[in-house]
Amino acid sequence: MLIQVVKSKIHRVKVTQADLNYIGSVTIDEALMDASKMIEGERVQIVNINNGERIETYVIKGERGSGTICLNGPAARRVAPGDKVIIIGYGFMNEEEARTFKPSLVFPDEETNLIH
């Protein structure tokens, strides 16, 4: 049996944009994607620390080093620029793998979203 566990997390990152008229997804700075081992198209959960909203969407690549975190489409109604969010990616693995697996956790600067 496979279980779902946290694979990746970008913790307390600042929303820089919200674009209601975009097709959908979350745009994430490519450097943050690499550090967290998230890939374009990956399903993620976004937890808004400011209002408690939880959103599921998928990742699209943003400009490397830009600090961009942009919620697109309907998700744009659930955040405001400046909100702090946690972006979580999950993976499926068997119980034996899950017991020793170590997720990729990223704690960017809360103002710039850049990794130091």
Image (cartoon, helix red, strand yellow):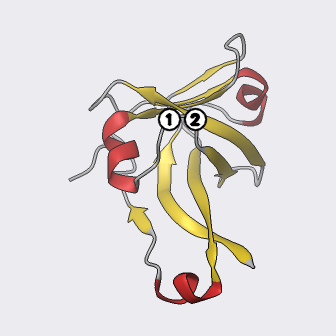
Q: Is residue 1 above or below residue 17?
A: below
C-alpha span from label 2 to label 1: 4 Å
Residue 21, percent across and down? 71, 10
Residue that lies at the very extreme toward the front in this rendered image: 1
Name the residue at 20% across, 53% down. Answer: 116
Label disc, if present, on residue 40 of the rendered structure: 1
- Secondary structure, mark 2, is loop
Going by the numbered disc 1, the residue's amino acid type is Glu
Label disc, if present, on residue 61 of the rendered structure: none
Residue 20, percent across and down? 72, 16
Q: Is residue 36 above or below residue 57?
A: below
Quarter of the image where the N terminus is located: bottom right
Q: Are marks 2 and 1 in contact (CB under 8 Å)?
A: yes
Asked whether residue 108 appears in the rendered view, the answer is: no
Asked whether 106 or 42 is in front, the reply is 42
Name the residue at 64% across, 86% down. Answer: 95
Residue 99, percent across and down? 54, 89
Number of residue marks: 2
Asked whether residue 6 appears in the rendered view, the answer is: yes
Q: How crowded is mark 1: few (under 14 residues within 10 Å), some or many (20 or more)?
A: some
- Secondary structure, mark 1, is loop
Residue that lies at the very extreme toward the top in this rendered image: 21
Asked whether 52 or 45 is in front, the reply is 45
Q: In this view, does 6 lie to the left or right of 102?
A: right
Q: Is residue 47 left or right of residue 63?
A: right
Q: In this view, does 110 lie above or below 101?
A: above
Residue 102, percent across and down? 43, 77
Asked whether 93 or 69 is in front, the reply is 93
Going by the numbered disc 2, the residue's amino acid type is Gly
Residue 52 falls in which quadrant of the image? bottom right
Name the residue carrying label 2. Answer: 41
